[in-house]
Protein backbone atom coordinates (compact mmCIF):
# COMPACT_ATOMS: atom_id res chain seq x y z
CA UNK A 1 0.00 0.00 0.00
CA UNK A 2 1.33 3.38 -1.00
CA UNK A 3 1.68 5.80 1.92
CA UNK A 4 0.03 9.21 1.43
CA UNK A 5 2.39 11.98 2.54
CA UNK A 6 1.28 15.30 4.00
CA UNK A 7 4.15 17.51 2.89
CA UNK A 8 3.98 21.29 2.98
CA UNK A 9 6.24 23.31 0.70
CA UNK A 10 7.24 26.94 1.06
CA UNK A 11 7.97 28.35 -2.37
CA UNK A 12 9.25 31.61 -0.85
CA UNK A 13 11.97 29.89 1.22
CA UNK A 14 15.62 29.91 0.22
CA UNK A 15 15.73 26.10 0.59
CA UNK A 16 15.09 24.31 -2.68
CA UNK A 17 11.85 22.39 -3.16
CA UNK A 18 13.76 19.12 -3.58
CA UNK A 19 15.51 19.68 -0.24
CA UNK A 20 12.20 20.52 1.47
CA UNK A 21 10.74 17.24 0.19
CA UNK A 22 13.79 15.32 1.42
CA UNK A 23 13.60 16.94 4.87
CA UNK A 24 9.87 16.24 5.14
CA UNK A 25 10.20 12.57 4.25
CA UNK A 26 13.21 12.18 6.57
CA UNK A 27 11.17 13.63 9.44
CA UNK A 28 8.35 11.20 8.68
CA UNK A 29 10.78 8.27 8.77
CA UNK A 30 12.42 9.44 12.02
CA UNK A 31 9.06 9.93 13.74
CA UNK A 32 7.77 6.51 12.71
CA UNK A 33 5.04 7.81 10.39
CA UNK A 34 6.88 5.99 7.62
CA UNK A 35 7.82 2.56 8.94
CA UNK A 36 10.49 0.32 7.38
CA UNK A 37 9.11 -1.21 4.20
CA UNK A 38 6.48 1.50 3.64
CA UNK A 39 6.07 2.32 -0.06
CA UNK A 40 6.46 5.93 -1.17
CA UNK A 41 4.43 7.50 -3.99
CA UNK A 42 5.98 7.41 -7.44
CA UNK A 43 7.78 10.48 -8.75
CA UNK A 44 4.82 11.25 -11.01
CA UNK A 45 2.16 10.86 -8.29
CA UNK A 46 4.00 12.91 -5.66
CA UNK A 47 4.91 15.58 -8.20
CA UNK A 48 1.23 15.89 -9.17
CA UNK A 49 0.17 16.00 -5.53
CA UNK A 50 2.64 18.76 -4.66
CA UNK A 51 2.44 20.66 -7.92
CA UNK A 52 6.16 20.38 -8.70
CA UNK A 53 8.22 18.99 -11.54
CA UNK A 54 8.82 15.25 -11.60
CA UNK A 55 12.57 15.91 -11.66
CA UNK A 56 12.27 17.76 -8.33
CA UNK A 57 10.80 14.67 -6.65
CA UNK A 58 13.38 12.46 -8.34
CA UNK A 59 16.18 14.60 -6.90
CA UNK A 60 14.67 14.35 -3.41
CA UNK A 61 14.38 10.56 -3.68
CA UNK A 62 17.97 10.26 -4.90
CA UNK A 63 19.18 12.23 -1.88
CA UNK A 64 17.19 9.95 0.41
CA UNK A 65 18.74 6.93 -1.28
CA UNK A 66 22.22 8.44 -0.82
CA UNK A 67 21.47 8.65 2.92
CA UNK A 68 20.33 4.98 2.82
CA UNK A 69 16.89 5.99 4.05
CA UNK A 70 15.03 4.54 1.04
CA UNK A 71 15.64 1.82 -1.50
CA UNK A 72 14.29 1.79 -5.02
CA UNK A 73 13.48 -1.23 -7.19
CA UNK A 74 11.47 -1.53 -10.38
CA UNK A 75 8.94 -4.12 -9.18
CA UNK A 76 8.40 -2.75 -5.67
CA UNK A 77 8.78 0.97 -6.23
CA UNK A 78 10.53 3.18 -3.65
CA UNK A 79 10.32 1.93 -0.08
CA UNK A 80 11.63 2.99 3.32
CA UNK A 81 14.80 1.08 4.15
CA UNK A 82 15.15 -1.09 7.24
CA UNK A 83 16.82 0.89 9.99
CA UNK A 84 17.19 0.66 13.78
CA UNK A 85 14.69 2.57 15.85
CA UNK A 86 15.89 6.08 16.50
CA UNK A 87 16.47 6.76 20.19
CA UNK A 88 15.89 10.26 21.43
CA UNK A 89 19.20 11.54 22.79
CA UNK A 90 19.35 14.02 25.65
CA UNK A 91 19.72 17.63 24.65
CA UNK A 92 23.33 18.53 25.47
CA UNK A 93 22.30 22.14 25.98
CA UNK A 94 20.29 21.05 29.04
CA UNK A 95 23.30 19.54 30.82
CA UNK A 96 26.00 21.66 32.41
CA UNK A 97 29.42 21.27 30.83
CA UNK A 98 31.02 19.92 33.99
CA UNK A 99 33.79 17.32 34.32
CA UNK A 100 33.16 14.14 36.34
CA UNK A 101 33.29 14.83 40.10
CA UNK A 102 36.54 12.87 40.41
CA UNK A 103 38.36 15.41 38.24
CA UNK A 104 36.77 18.71 39.22
CA UNK A 105 39.55 19.49 41.69
CA UNK A 106 42.12 19.24 38.91
CA UNK A 107 40.28 21.51 36.49
CA UNK A 108 39.50 24.42 38.79
CA UNK A 109 41.43 27.63 38.44
CA UNK A 110 44.52 28.14 40.57
CA UNK A 111 43.43 28.67 44.19
CA UNK A 112 45.06 28.82 47.61
CA UNK A 113 45.77 25.35 49.05
CA UNK A 114 45.29 23.72 45.64
CA UNK A 115 47.02 20.37 45.23
CA UNK A 116 48.72 18.86 42.21
CA UNK A 117 50.05 22.07 40.65
CA UNK A 118 53.48 23.71 40.92
CA UNK A 119 54.12 27.33 41.89
CA UNK A 120 53.65 29.50 38.82
CA UNK A 121 55.30 32.52 40.46
CA UNK A 122 58.69 30.78 40.72
CA UNK A 123 59.07 29.22 37.27
CA UNK A 124 61.53 30.62 34.68
CA UNK A 125 58.72 31.43 32.26
CA UNK A 126 60.74 33.56 29.82
CA UNK A 127 63.49 30.97 29.50
CA UNK A 128 61.17 28.03 28.95
CA UNK A 129 58.99 30.01 26.53
CA UNK A 130 62.07 30.74 24.43
CA UNK A 131 63.04 27.06 24.39
CA UNK A 132 59.52 26.04 23.37
CA UNK A 133 59.35 28.66 20.62
CA UNK A 134 62.68 27.48 19.21
CA UNK A 135 61.55 23.85 19.34
CA UNK A 136 58.23 24.70 17.67
CA UNK A 137 60.00 26.45 14.79
CA UNK A 138 62.31 23.47 14.38
CA UNK A 139 59.34 21.10 14.37
CA UNK A 140 57.57 23.05 11.61
CA UNK A 141 60.69 23.03 9.45
CA UNK A 142 61.51 19.36 10.00
CA UNK A 143 60.80 16.66 7.37
CA UNK A 144 57.16 15.56 7.35
CA UNK A 145 57.63 12.10 8.82
CA UNK A 146 56.08 10.36 11.80
CA UNK A 147 58.00 10.99 15.04
CA UNK A 148 59.24 8.09 17.14
CA UNK A 149 56.18 6.89 19.13
CA UNK A 150 58.49 5.95 22.01
CA UNK A 151 59.54 9.59 22.40
CA UNK A 152 62.32 11.82 21.13
CA UNK A 153 65.76 10.25 21.65
CA UNK A 154 67.14 13.50 23.12
CA UNK A 155 64.58 13.57 25.93
CA UNK A 156 64.90 9.86 26.66
CA UNK A 157 68.67 10.27 27.02
CA UNK A 158 68.27 13.26 29.36
CA UNK A 159 65.74 11.44 31.53
CA UNK A 160 67.99 8.39 31.80
CA UNK A 161 70.93 10.56 32.91
CA UNK A 162 68.77 12.51 35.37
CA UNK A 163 67.30 9.36 36.93
CA UNK A 164 70.76 7.91 37.45
CA UNK A 165 71.89 11.02 39.35
CA UNK A 166 68.78 11.91 41.32
CA UNK A 167 66.82 8.67 41.81
CA UNK A 168 69.51 5.98 41.76
CA UNK A 169 68.00 4.32 38.69
CA UNK A 170 70.31 2.61 36.21
CA UNK A 171 68.49 2.25 32.91
CA UNK A 172 69.08 2.67 29.20
CA UNK A 173 67.24 5.27 27.10
CA UNK A 174 65.68 2.34 25.24
CA UNK A 175 63.80 1.44 28.45
CA UNK A 176 62.19 4.89 28.66
CA UNK A 177 58.89 5.68 26.95
CA UNK A 178 57.49 9.21 26.83
CA UNK A 179 53.77 9.46 27.56
CA UNK A 180 50.94 11.96 27.94
CA UNK A 181 51.51 12.59 31.64
CA UNK A 182 51.14 10.09 34.47
CA UNK A 183 47.69 9.01 33.25
CA UNK A 184 49.06 8.11 29.84
CA UNK A 185 51.90 6.17 31.43
CA UNK A 186 49.56 4.23 33.72
CA UNK A 187 47.17 3.50 30.85
CA UNK A 188 49.80 2.03 28.57
CA UNK A 189 51.31 0.07 31.48
CA UNK A 190 47.98 -1.58 32.29
CA UNK A 191 47.56 -2.44 28.61
CA UNK A 192 50.95 -4.12 28.56
CA UNK A 193 50.37 -6.11 31.75
CA UNK A 194 47.03 -7.55 30.53
CA UNK A 195 45.81 -8.30 34.06
CA UNK A 196 42.07 -7.92 33.44
CA UNK A 197 39.93 -9.80 35.95
CA UNK A 198 42.65 -10.03 38.58
CA UNK A 199 43.22 -8.17 41.85
CA UNK A 200 45.54 -5.23 42.46
CA UNK A 201 46.88 -3.68 45.65
CA UNK A 202 46.10 0.00 46.15
CA UNK A 203 47.14 2.19 49.04
CA UNK A 204 44.37 3.19 51.45
CA UNK A 205 44.21 6.16 51.51
CA UNK A 206 45.51 6.60 47.99
CA UNK A 207 45.16 8.67 44.82
CA UNK A 208 41.50 8.29 43.70
CA UNK A 209 42.08 8.56 39.90
CA UNK A 210 44.66 5.78 40.05
CA UNK A 211 42.23 3.51 41.83
CA UNK A 212 39.56 4.34 39.28
CA UNK A 213 42.00 3.66 36.43
CA UNK A 214 42.48 0.11 37.70
CA UNK A 215 38.72 -0.39 37.77
CA UNK A 216 38.38 0.90 34.21
CA UNK A 217 41.11 -1.57 33.21
CA UNK A 218 38.91 -4.30 34.75
CA UNK A 219 41.10 -5.02 37.75
CA UNK A 220 39.68 -5.35 41.28
CA UNK A 221 41.42 -2.92 43.66
CA UNK A 222 42.26 -4.34 47.10
CA UNK A 223 42.76 -1.56 49.69
CA UNK A 224 45.98 -1.98 51.69
CA UNK A 225 46.35 0.16 54.85
CA UNK A 226 49.08 2.77 55.15
CA UNK A 227 50.91 3.52 58.41
CA UNK A 228 54.06 5.41 59.44
CA UNK A 229 56.20 2.97 57.40
CA UNK A 230 54.11 3.23 54.25
CA UNK A 231 51.89 0.59 52.68
CA UNK A 232 51.47 -2.51 54.88
CA UNK A 233 52.98 -5.23 52.71
CA UNK A 234 52.28 -7.99 55.25
CA UNK A 235 48.59 -7.09 55.20
CA UNK A 236 48.58 -7.31 51.42
CA UNK A 237 50.30 -10.70 51.44
CA UNK A 238 47.77 -11.99 53.98
CA UNK A 239 44.65 -10.73 52.19
CA UNK A 240 45.60 -10.74 48.49
CA UNK A 241 48.83 -12.66 47.94
CA UNK A 242 47.65 -13.63 44.44
CA UNK A 243 47.28 -10.04 43.23
CA UNK A 244 48.59 -9.30 39.75
CA UNK A 245 50.17 -5.99 40.72
CA UNK A 246 50.65 -3.35 43.41
CA UNK A 247 50.31 0.37 42.66
CA UNK A 248 52.33 2.31 45.24
CA UNK A 249 53.85 5.74 45.96
CA UNK A 250 56.97 4.71 47.93
CA UNK A 251 58.92 7.99 47.70
CA UNK A 252 56.20 10.10 49.35
CA UNK A 253 52.96 8.29 49.95
CA UNK A 254 49.97 10.15 48.55
CA UNK A 255 48.38 11.71 50.56
CA UNK A 256 50.11 11.06 53.91
CA UNK A 257 53.63 11.87 52.70
CA UNK A 258 55.32 8.98 54.56
CA UNK A 259 58.34 7.23 53.10
CA UNK A 260 58.10 3.49 52.45
CA UNK A 261 60.62 1.95 54.83
CA UNK A 262 63.57 -0.05 53.54
CA UNK A 263 62.30 -3.25 55.19
CA UNK A 264 58.95 -2.95 53.44
CA UNK A 265 60.60 -2.09 50.12
CA UNK A 266 62.57 -5.32 50.28
CA UNK A 267 59.48 -7.24 51.40
CA UNK A 268 57.40 -5.80 48.54
CA UNK A 269 59.97 -6.73 45.89
CA UNK A 270 60.36 -10.22 47.36
CA UNK A 271 56.59 -10.72 47.20
CA UNK A 272 56.46 -9.62 43.56
CA UNK A 273 59.44 -11.79 42.63
CA UNK A 274 58.04 -14.84 44.38
CA UNK A 275 54.53 -14.57 42.92
CA UNK A 276 55.29 -13.12 39.48
CA UNK A 277 53.41 -9.93 40.33
CA UNK A 278 54.29 -6.44 39.08
CA UNK A 279 54.91 -3.29 41.09
CA UNK A 280 53.93 0.04 39.53
CA UNK A 281 55.95 2.77 41.22
CA UNK A 282 54.22 6.16 41.00
CA UNK A 283 57.10 8.56 41.60
CA UNK A 284 54.77 11.54 41.35
CA UNK A 285 57.04 14.04 43.14
CA UNK A 286 60.39 12.63 42.08
CA UNK A 287 63.14 14.26 44.08
CA UNK A 288 60.93 17.05 45.48
CA UNK A 289 61.29 15.85 49.06
CA UNK A 290 61.43 18.92 51.26
CA UNK A 291 62.93 17.69 54.53
CA UNK A 292 65.73 15.45 53.35
CA UNK A 293 67.62 14.22 50.35
CA UNK A 294 65.25 12.25 48.13
CA UNK A 295 65.30 8.55 48.89
CA UNK A 296 66.34 6.31 45.97
CA UNK A 297 63.48 5.06 43.85
CA UNK A 298 62.04 1.65 44.60
CA UNK A 299 63.16 0.38 41.20
CA UNK A 300 66.80 0.99 42.22
CA UNK A 301 66.50 -2.01 44.58
CA UNK A 302 64.91 -4.25 41.96
CA UNK A 303 67.32 -6.83 40.57
CA UNK A 304 64.64 -9.12 39.10
CA UNK A 305 62.78 -6.69 36.83
CA UNK A 306 59.43 -6.59 38.64
CA UNK A 307 59.15 -2.80 39.14
CA UNK A 308 57.74 -0.46 36.50
CA UNK A 309 58.71 3.12 37.32
CA UNK A 310 56.45 6.03 36.29
CA UNK A 311 57.35 9.71 36.57
CA UNK A 312 56.16 12.98 35.12
CA UNK A 313 57.00 16.68 34.82
CA UNK A 314 53.58 17.84 36.04
CA UNK A 315 54.72 18.79 39.56
CA UNK A 316 58.26 19.84 38.70
CA UNK A 317 57.59 21.96 35.57
CA UNK A 318 53.91 22.19 34.63
CA UNK A 319 50.87 19.93 34.17
CA UNK A 320 50.14 21.78 30.92
CA UNK A 321 53.04 19.93 29.30
CA UNK A 322 51.14 16.62 29.64
CA UNK A 323 54.55 14.95 29.76
CA UNK A 324 55.31 11.73 31.64
CA UNK A 325 57.48 8.68 31.20
CA UNK A 326 57.74 4.97 31.97
CA UNK A 327 60.90 3.07 32.77
CA UNK A 328 60.11 -0.44 31.55
CA UNK A 329 61.89 -3.54 32.85
CA UNK A 330 64.12 -5.07 30.15
CA UNK A 331 61.74 -8.01 29.69
CA UNK A 332 58.85 -5.69 28.79
CA UNK A 333 60.61 -3.23 26.47
CA UNK A 334 59.32 -4.80 23.27
CA UNK A 335 55.75 -4.98 24.62
CA UNK A 336 55.84 -1.32 25.62
CA UNK A 337 57.25 -0.36 22.23
CA UNK A 338 54.43 -2.13 20.44
CA UNK A 339 51.77 -0.69 22.78
CA UNK A 340 52.86 2.94 22.39
CA UNK A 341 53.24 2.55 18.63
CA UNK A 342 49.69 1.25 18.21
CA UNK A 343 47.77 2.85 21.08
CA UNK A 344 49.54 5.72 22.85
CA UNK A 345 52.37 7.44 20.96
CA UNK A 346 54.38 10.14 22.69
CA UNK A 347 53.21 13.78 22.60
CA UNK A 348 54.46 16.15 19.90
CA UNK A 349 58.22 16.55 19.44
CA UNK A 350 58.35 20.29 20.20
CA UNK A 351 57.44 20.04 23.88
CA UNK A 352 59.78 17.06 24.27
CA UNK A 353 62.73 18.81 22.66
CA UNK A 354 62.20 21.97 24.71
CA UNK A 355 62.16 19.91 27.89
CA UNK A 356 65.27 18.01 26.81
CA UNK A 357 67.16 21.27 26.26
CA UNK A 358 65.91 22.60 29.60
CA UNK A 359 67.43 19.52 31.24
CA UNK A 360 70.59 19.34 29.15
CA UNK A 361 71.65 22.92 29.93
CA UNK A 362 71.26 22.41 33.69
CA UNK A 363 68.16 24.60 34.08
CA UNK A 364 66.03 21.74 35.37
CA UNK A 365 68.29 20.85 38.30
CA UNK A 366 68.69 24.52 39.25
CA UNK A 367 64.92 24.93 39.10
CA UNK A 368 64.37 21.89 41.34
CA UNK A 369 66.86 23.13 43.94
CA UNK A 370 65.15 26.51 44.03
CA UNK A 371 61.67 25.01 44.26
CA UNK A 372 62.68 22.82 47.21
CA UNK A 373 63.68 25.98 49.08
CA UNK A 374 60.48 27.81 48.09
CA UNK A 375 58.18 24.90 48.91
CA UNK A 376 60.03 24.17 52.14
CA UNK A 377 59.52 27.73 53.33
CA UNK A 378 55.83 27.76 52.40
CA UNK A 379 55.25 24.37 53.99
CA UNK A 380 56.90 25.41 57.25
CA UNK A 381 54.91 28.65 57.36
CA UNK A 382 51.58 26.89 56.80
CA UNK A 383 52.40 24.14 59.29
CA UNK A 384 53.39 26.64 61.97
CA UNK A 385 50.24 28.71 61.45
CA UNK A 386 47.94 25.71 61.67
CA UNK A 387 49.67 24.51 64.84
CA UNK A 388 49.31 27.97 66.38
CA UNK A 389 45.57 27.67 65.72
CA UNK A 390 45.46 24.35 67.58
CA UNK A 391 45.08 21.99 64.61
CA UNK A 392 46.75 18.54 64.44
CA UNK A 393 48.66 18.87 61.18
CA UNK A 394 51.87 17.57 59.63
CA UNK A 395 53.76 18.09 56.35
CA UNK A 396 52.81 15.63 53.59
CA UNK A 397 54.68 15.88 50.31
CA UNK A 398 53.98 19.28 48.80
CA UNK A 399 51.20 19.89 51.27
CA UNK A 400 50.13 19.86 54.89
CA UNK A 401 47.69 17.23 56.12
CA UNK A 402 45.16 18.60 58.60
CA UNK A 403 43.09 15.97 60.41
CA UNK A 404 39.57 16.97 61.42
CA UNK A 405 37.45 15.81 64.38
CA UNK A 406 35.42 12.65 63.89
CA UNK A 407 32.08 13.50 62.34
CA UNK A 408 33.35 16.53 60.46
CA UNK A 409 32.30 16.60 56.81
CA UNK A 410 35.51 17.37 54.96
CA UNK A 411 33.80 17.17 51.55
CA UNK A 412 31.33 19.90 52.51
CA UNK A 413 34.14 22.06 53.89
CA UNK A 414 36.13 21.60 50.67
CA UNK A 415 33.11 22.46 48.54
CA UNK A 416 32.32 25.59 50.54
CA UNK A 417 35.99 26.60 50.47
CA UNK A 418 35.96 26.77 46.67
CA UNK A 419 33.40 29.59 46.87
CA UNK A 420 35.90 31.76 48.78
CA UNK A 421 38.96 30.99 46.64
CA UNK A 422 40.38 28.04 48.60
CA UNK A 423 40.92 24.55 47.19
CA UNK A 424 41.78 22.00 49.89
CA UNK A 425 41.32 18.33 49.05
CA UNK A 426 39.03 16.27 51.32
CA UNK A 427 40.95 13.26 52.63
CA UNK A 428 37.85 11.09 52.95
CA UNK A 429 37.74 10.97 49.14
CA UNK A 430 41.19 9.33 49.13
CA UNK A 431 39.96 6.35 51.15
CA UNK A 432 38.39 3.35 49.45
CA UNK A 433 34.61 3.79 49.64
CA UNK A 434 33.82 0.45 51.31
CA UNK A 435 36.00 0.94 54.39
CA UNK A 436 36.47 3.34 57.27
CA UNK A 437 37.17 6.94 56.31
CA UNK A 438 38.91 9.55 58.41
CA UNK A 439 38.01 13.20 57.75
CA UNK A 440 40.76 15.65 56.97
CA UNK A 441 42.01 18.21 54.48
CA UNK A 442 45.14 18.14 52.34
CA UNK A 443 46.35 21.71 51.90
CA UNK A 444 48.73 22.25 49.00
CA UNK A 445 51.60 24.68 49.59
CA UNK A 446 52.67 25.49 46.03
CA UNK A 447 50.06 28.19 45.42
CA UNK A 448 50.33 29.83 48.86
CA UNK A 449 52.21 33.13 48.87
CA UNK A 450 53.20 34.74 52.15
CA UNK A 451 50.74 37.61 51.79
CA UNK A 452 47.75 35.26 51.34
CA UNK A 453 48.45 32.77 54.09
CA UNK A 454 47.00 34.45 57.19
CA UNK A 455 43.69 35.45 55.59
CA UNK A 456 43.34 32.03 53.90
CA UNK A 457 43.86 30.16 57.17
CA UNK A 458 41.33 32.41 58.92
CA UNK A 459 38.71 31.70 56.24
CA UNK A 460 39.41 27.98 56.42
CA UNK A 461 39.16 28.08 60.23
CA UNK A 462 35.71 29.64 60.03
CA UNK A 463 34.54 26.98 57.58
CA UNK A 464 35.84 24.18 59.80
CA UNK A 465 34.04 25.63 62.82
CA UNK A 466 30.84 25.97 60.83
CA UNK A 467 30.75 22.45 59.37
CA UNK A 468 32.34 20.37 62.16
Image (cartoon, grey):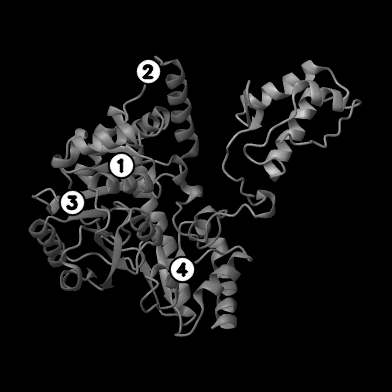
Q: Is residue 123 left or right of residue 302?
A: right
Mark 3 and mark 2 in contact? Answer it, CB < 8 Å: no
Q: From this view, report whether residue 440 is shown above or below residue 164.
A: below
How many angstroms separate mark 4 from mark 3 (CA)? 35 Å
Q: Residue at x 49, y 80 (%)?
A: 389
Q: Gap in Å between the C-alphas at discs 4 and 2?
A: 51 Å
Query: What's the CA distance linking mark 1 and mark 4?
Result: 32 Å
Q: Residues within 10 Å of mark 4 (few under 14, many from 20)?
A: many
Q: Would you name the residue on which mark 4 appears?
A: 382
Seen in the picture, residue 172 relative to 184 is either above or below; the reply is above
Q: Is residue 392 above or below residue 322?
A: below
The quadrant in which the N terminus is found is top right
Residue 410 position within the rendered picture, expressed as x and y whole percent measured from the top left: 50, 75
Q: Residue at x 20, y 33 (%)?
A: 174
- Label 1 or label 2, whichever comes before in sequence order: 2
Q: How many marks?
A: 4
Residue 402 position within the rendered picture, expressed as x and y whole percent measured from the top left: 43, 74
For marks 4 and 3, give the one nearer the viewer: 3
Q: CA separation, marks 1 and 2?
A: 23 Å
Residue 202 in the image, given as x and y percentages of width and height: 29, 64
Of marks 4 and 2, which one's residue comes earlier in the chain?
Answer: 2
Image quadrant occupied by the C terminus: bottom right
- Report the Cα–Cα distance between label 1 and label 3: 14 Å
Task: Give the number of the disc on residue 325.
Answer: 1
Which sits earlier in the primary sequence, circle 1 or circle 3?
Answer: 3
Q: Which mark is residue 145?
A: 2
| Disc 3 target residue | 307
Amino acid sequence: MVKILNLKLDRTAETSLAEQIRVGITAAIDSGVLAPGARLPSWLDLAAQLGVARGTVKTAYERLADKQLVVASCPGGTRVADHPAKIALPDPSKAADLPPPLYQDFLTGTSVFQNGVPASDSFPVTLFARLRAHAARAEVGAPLIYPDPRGEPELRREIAAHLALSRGIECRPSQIFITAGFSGALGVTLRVLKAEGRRAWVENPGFPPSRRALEIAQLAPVPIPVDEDGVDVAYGMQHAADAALALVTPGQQAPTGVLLSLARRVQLIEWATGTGAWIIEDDYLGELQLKRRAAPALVSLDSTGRVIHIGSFSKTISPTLRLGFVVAPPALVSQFAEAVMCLAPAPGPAVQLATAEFMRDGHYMRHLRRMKRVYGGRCNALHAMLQSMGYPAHPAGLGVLLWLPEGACDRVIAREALAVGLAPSPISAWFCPDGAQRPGLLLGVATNTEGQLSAACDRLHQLIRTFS
